[in-house]
Image (tube, rainbow, N blue to C red):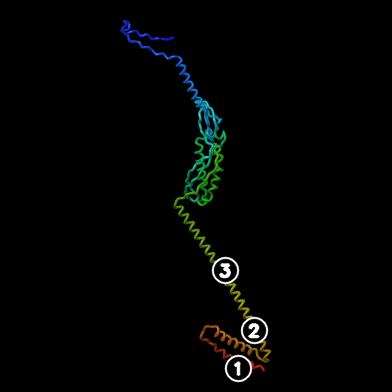
Amino acid sequence: MRFVSITRSASHPENRDRPQEKETPVIPPIVLLTGFAVLGLFLAICLLFGGIMIVPGRMVYVTEFLGKPQRRLLESGLHFRIPILTRVSYRVSLQQMQVETSSEVKTRDDVFIEIRWVLLYSVRDDNEAVFNYAYKVSQPVKRLVFRVENEIRQIASTMTLAELYSQRNEIARRVIADQAADALDSGLDIHGVTIEQPMPPREIQEAMNNKLAAIARKDAAQAEAEAEMVRRVGIARAEAESKKLQGEGIANERKAIAAGFAEAAELFRLSVPGVSEEAILTLMQNVNQADMVVTASRSGKATVIFVPTDMNTGQIAAASAGQFIPAVQ
């Protein structure tokens, strides 16, 4: 059926005094059906592709249906959802991550020092842990960093600066042991805490260097004194041993001389019967004195030798007393 709008001529007597009517266009039904079909198809395609979701590797999506959290997590792979009604509330990475920061601490010996440290953590690959990470605590990583920083400050306050340098691994071990359970309650695993080299102020560094230099000089002086003591003790022992050997040599020499004197005196007694002991001793003394003068004149460098006057006096006295040994017949 076709509707046609009839417009009368303006010259018609009935239409001269009223406005002219226009023809209204009519859209065919087939065109309307085609438009609705295209629009429906477009909406269907949007809904279809809006419901397709691809989760990357080592990622977990937490969804909400009409605002209610769903404990069924979307893991890596292809998933379908109801658009508009279902939305992704959290995208959680299961990869290991790290936080690098620095903290100012006070040691037991009242030194303020800055420590740089690194926290390695990750969200545990478990539905309950991921759900706790998303909903149990607000900003769980920030909370974990705050607790680790407080733990480091508390441990550092019980150590001296020297202990802080030498026990960095012990600090890291204690932090992990104390904070692991609380971190797991928020769905996090602590994989490690690295305490870097402490950086004291320049004045403290200079004071430490001066102290170490003084200790090194003290140790060097002590070692040098001990070496000198050992050297002197060695020299003294060597001298004592040398004098001991020298004394033994002199004693043996005198023993040999005394044995020679005894043998000579006995030979005099046998060769000259009736000779007195005094005469024998006087003769031996005079012989020794004469040998001494001869030895001194041969081996010494002196040009003048003073001979004791009692050498001749003793001989004269012995002769006047008749104590010279008579000639052997």
Place of residue 82 in the rendered image (x, y in percent of width and height, measured from the top left):
52, 25
Please tell me whether residue 14 is drawn above or below residue 130 in the rendered image.
above
Between disc 2 and disc 1, the foreground one is 2
Q: Where is the N terminus found, in terms of image quarters? A: top left
Residue corresponding to mark 3? 234
Camera-side mark, 3 or 1? 3
Amino acid at pointer 2: Gly
Determine which quarter of the picture holds residue 71. Answer: top right
Residue 268 horizontal side relative to residue 41, left or right? right
Chain-order first, disc 2 or disc 3: 3
- The residue singled out by tag 1 in the image is 319
Residue displayed at 58% across by 71% down: 238
Of the residues shown, which amino acid type is indicated by label 3? Answer: Gly
Q: Quadrant of residue 178?
A: top right
Image quarter in which the C terminus is found: bottom right
Residue for badge 2:
260
Amino acid carrying label 1: it is Ala
Residue at the image point whose x is 37% and y is 12% from the top: 23
- Secondary structure, mark 2, is helix
x, y percent for residue 209: 47, 55
